[in-house]
Image: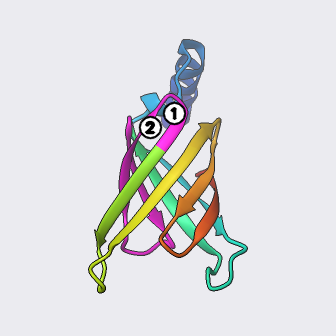
């Protein structure tokens, strides 16, 4: 019972003081990655926001992009050498609006529309 009352008080103080997502220690988002390109299947992605640091995991796999959020602009990237000695670079460019992050995730072969909701 006291915990519920404490959460209400914290939420009220946060609302009254203008807390934003960037001021919270950890906020998580998840949602769809959609592409209309052949050979680029739809999948899910997860984004973790810790103050101004961003971790984005496309396809909920092991490949994680790192980046930052500045204002409402979210950017994350990662690259590595591929088997043919070319650079395999991936990038997330998105914006935060309320409880949603919307943008584009690109790989060397695919471009995805990203829509992630806070959970």
Of all residues, the one furthest to the top in this rendering is: 17
Question: 51 and 71: which one is in front?
Answer: 71
Q: Nearer the viewer, mark 2 or mark 1?
A: 2
Q: Quadrant of residue 45?
A: bottom right
Residue 50 among those drawn in magenta: no
| First of labels 2, 1 by sequence position | 1
> Dot 2 corresponds to which residue?
69
Label 2: element kind: strand
Label 1: element kind: helix
Residue at the spot 62% in from the left edge and 85% down from the top edge:
39
Question: 95 and 27: which one is in front?
Answer: 95
Query: Residue 21 has which mark?
Result: 1
* In the image, residue 89 above or below residue 73: below
CB atoms at circles 2 and 1 under 8 Å apart? no
Question: 70 and 8: which one is in front?
Answer: 70
Q: Is 19 left, or right, of 50 in this rendering? A: right
Give residue 114's position: percent from left, percent from top.
63, 58
Residue 55 among those drawn in magenta: yes
Q: Is 29 left, or right, of 49 in this rendering? A: right
Give residue 82's position: percent from left, percent from top.
31, 79
Q: Quadrant of residue 79?
A: bottom left
Q: CA distance from mark 2 to mark 1?
A: 10 Å
Magenta residues (range): 51-74
Give residue 90's position: percent from left, percent from top.
43, 63
Residue at the spot 51% in from the left edge and 25% down from the top edge:
10
Question: 19 and 87: which one is in front?
Answer: 87
- Count of numbered circles on the image: 2
């Amino acid at each position: 019972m006291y915990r519920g009352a404490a959460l209400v008080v914290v939420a009220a103080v946060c609302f009254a003081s203008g807390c934003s997502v960037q001021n919270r220690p950890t906020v998580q988002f998840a949602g769809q990655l959609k592409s209309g390109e052949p050979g680029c299947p739809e999948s899910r992605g997860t984004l973790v926001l810790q103050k101004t640091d961003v971790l984005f995991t496309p396809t909920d796999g092991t490949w994680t992009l790192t980046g930052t959020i500045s204002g409402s602009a979210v950017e994350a990237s990662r690259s590595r050498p591929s088997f043919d000695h070319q650079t395999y670079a991936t990038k997330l460019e998105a914006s935060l609006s309320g409880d949603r992050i919307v943008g584009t995730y690109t790989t060397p072969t695919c471009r995805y529309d990203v829509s992630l909701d806070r959970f």
